[in-house]
Image (cartoon, rainbow, N blue to C red):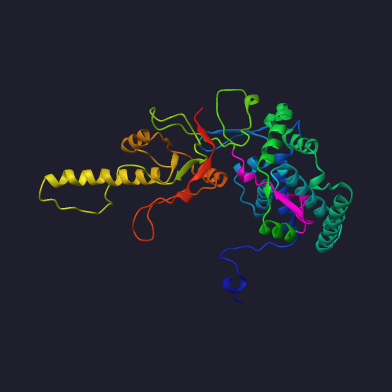
Amino acid sequence: MSAPNPASTGLFINGQRETGQDVRIGNVTAALAVANIVKTSLGPVGLDKMLVDDIGDVLITNDGATILKSLEVEHPAARVLVDLANLQDQEVGDGTTSVVIIASELLRRGNDLVKNGIHPTTIISGYRTALKAAVSYIKREMVVHVSELTDEHLINAAKTSMSSKIIGKEMDFFSKLAVEAVKSVKMNATAADIAGYDAMGSGGKDKAASSASSGSGKKQRYKYPLSAIHILKAHGKSSLESHLIDGGFAINATRAAQGMPTFVESSDGKPVGIAMLDMNLQRHRMGMGVQVVVKDPAEIENIKKREMDITKERVRKIIDAGARVVLTTKGVDDLCMKYFVEAGIICARRCNREDLKRLAKATGGRVVTTMADMEGNESFDAECLGGCDSAREV
């Protein structure tokens, strides 16, 4: 009797197929093992976990998503719970530990029902029916429209999220700070946003607030983009000295030279122009592989002078466009700093790229990656500049 062909069975050589109860028990056991890791960190009296990686770095946290991200989970069923916690963290920002514990408990209870002779399809159907009943009850009895929420409701929600975190002792202070920060980025929702809210089936209740707009019967919806909130961390003071810069934006950068001004403000009704660059402001050098054969030694000085002139022309185009603040993610050499100091411009280098993207969105500008145009020349469009009332180094 010949052995079965591995290609026909879909198994590798010396492979083994597992089905039925053994696989189900193994999946539930793996899920429960993951849940048991984060179970003791749940709630305001939950315990912190100390995680040590391969190189000896120590991480202390009680956040479920952070703990699960640090684990090297290989089992497919357990990996689903890790992905579930990550998705919860991205969509909601809280409840990562709770969602893992609930999911694992549902698996455990379902496995017990299977042992009592109930078919898995029947159990899944029951879970779906319970889900519909739970969602229906929440919408009917517990949902409050966003337009009816007051600051007290928002602060209480923030306190609930912070109660199990390190800042839980100062949750009264930080909850008010968080609510003020979110309200400061309020903006009108676009037609695309409204279409997206309606497609989710919630009518935008969880993402946009509605209020009657003046002069029309239509309701104006608003959105609060959390990505517009910039969190700047600094060492050396108490956490209770944290504060919100209302109507402003702060980045972790300093002047590139001491001769630059520390404060610029708008004049003649024109806002302060902010140039946000993602390129080097350094002396121009020829590219790799470019060779220049010079027969007259005097031409070497002319080449160096032209390299300096190219740099000067670039800086001059930025200044002529109206920029009074220049921020770049790359370096700025002494030659460029000299021109900026003479023009009375604030320049900062080595800025974070994500910070500049967020600043560009807040000021109405664009991050410029190159000054080359379609014709092969170099220019700087004034429309790329952001605008503000004043800029200050503190």
Residue farthest toward the bottom in the current orientation of the protein? 1
Residue 291, given in percent of the width and then of the height, sits at 20, 53
Task: Please give the name of the residue rendered at 89% of the width and 52% of the height, measured from the top-left corner.
Answer: 140
Q: Nearer the viewer, residue 386 or 207?
A: 386
Q: Nearer the viewer, residue 202 or 71?
A: 202
Task: Please give the name of the residue rendered at 60% of the width and 69% of the height, measured from the top-left corner.
Answer: 10
15, above or below 37, in the image: below
Kindly tell me whether residue 164 is visible in this rendering: no
12, above or below 282, in the image: below
Q: Nearer the viewer, residue 37 or 59?
A: 59
Q: Quadrant of residue 237?
A: top right
Residue 131, given in percent of the width and then of the height, sits at 83, 55
Q: Quadrant of the N terminus?
A: bottom right
Q: Magenta stretch: residue 182 in it?
A: no
Kindly tell me whether residue 330 is visible in this rendering: yes
Q: Magenta stretch: residue 203 in it?
A: yes
Residue farthest toward the left in the current orientation of the protein? 296
Tally of numbered discs: 0
Q: Nearer the viewer, residue 343 or 3?
A: 343
Region rendered in magenta:
201-230
Q: Quadrant of residue 312?
A: top left
Task: Please give the name of the residue rendered at 80% of the width and 35% of the height, measured from the top-left corner.
Answer: 152
Residue 251 left/right relative to 294: right
Q: Quadrant of residue 300?
A: top left
Task: Please give the name of the residue rendered at 71% of the width and 37% of the height, measured from the top-left corner.
Answer: 179
